[in-house]
């Protein structure tokens, strides 16, 4: 009977250690996932901010150019057909009976929906599934 009690204690001790280990893993994995997901989100937002700053600088330069006489004249010529006195304006049209066809661009191919089985696990552990 002493052996059975010792075995029971060992099994219950191992079970307790496993339960504690699983609890520690789960209590640390979820916050770790959220931290990684937030870091990824911050990086994406910083990249978006950089792109928007570049766009803002470009638009500011364009606005400055459009306030000059050359900018105004360029827009008047392009959009409104402005010609100065003494200039001759030409308009190019398609010959009668000939139609110009418009072909819309093809959509991007859909990414393969099936992923490798471990990719889902990795995305879960790193928090990428939280980013959507």
Image (cartoon, rainbow, N blue to C red):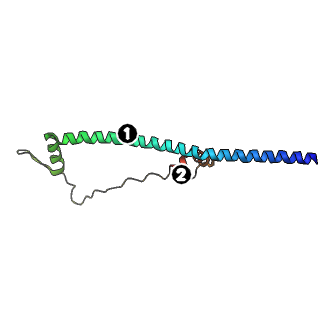
Mark 1, residue position: 50
* Image-quadrant location for residue 69: top left
Please, what secondary structure does the residue beneath circle 1 have?
helix
Name the residue nearer the viewer: 17 or 101: 17
Q: Position of residue 43 (x, y in %)?
A: 46, 40
80 relative to 45 in the view: left or right? left
As measured in the structure, the alpha-carbon distance from the residue carrying label 1 to the one carrying label 2 is 30 Å
128 relative to 54 in the view: left or right? right
Q: Position of residue 95 (x, y in %)?
A: 21, 56
Q: Position of residue 21 (x, y in %)?
A: 71, 44
* Furthest residue in direction right, as rendered: 1
**Residue displayed at 32% across by 42% down:** 55
**Residue displayed at 18% across by 51% down:** 92
First in residue order: circle 1 vs circle 2: 1
Please, what secondary structure does the residue beneath circle 2 have?
loop
Q: Position of residue 82 (x, y in %)?
A: 12, 48
59 relative to 118 in the view: left or right? left
Name the residue nearer the viewer: 48 or 116: 48
Mark 2, residue position: 112
Which mark is nearer the camera, 1 or 2? 1
């Amino acid at each position: 009977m002493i052996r059975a009690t010792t075995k029971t204690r060992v099994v219950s001790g191992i079970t307790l250690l496993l339960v504690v280990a699983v609890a520690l893993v789960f209590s640390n994995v979820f916050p770790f996932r959220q931290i990684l997901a937030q870091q990824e989100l911050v990086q994406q937002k910083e990249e978006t901010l950089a792109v928007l700053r570049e766009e803002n600088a470009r638009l500011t330069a364009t606005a400055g150019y459009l306030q000059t006489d050359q900018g105004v004249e360029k827009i008047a010529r392009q959009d409104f057909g402005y010609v100065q006195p003494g200039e001759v304006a030409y308009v190019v049209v398609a010959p009668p009976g000939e139609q110009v066809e418009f072909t819309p661009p093809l959509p991007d191919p859909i990414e393969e929906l099936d992923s490798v089985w471990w990719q889902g696990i990795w995305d879960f552990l790193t928090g990428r599934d939280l980013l959507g």
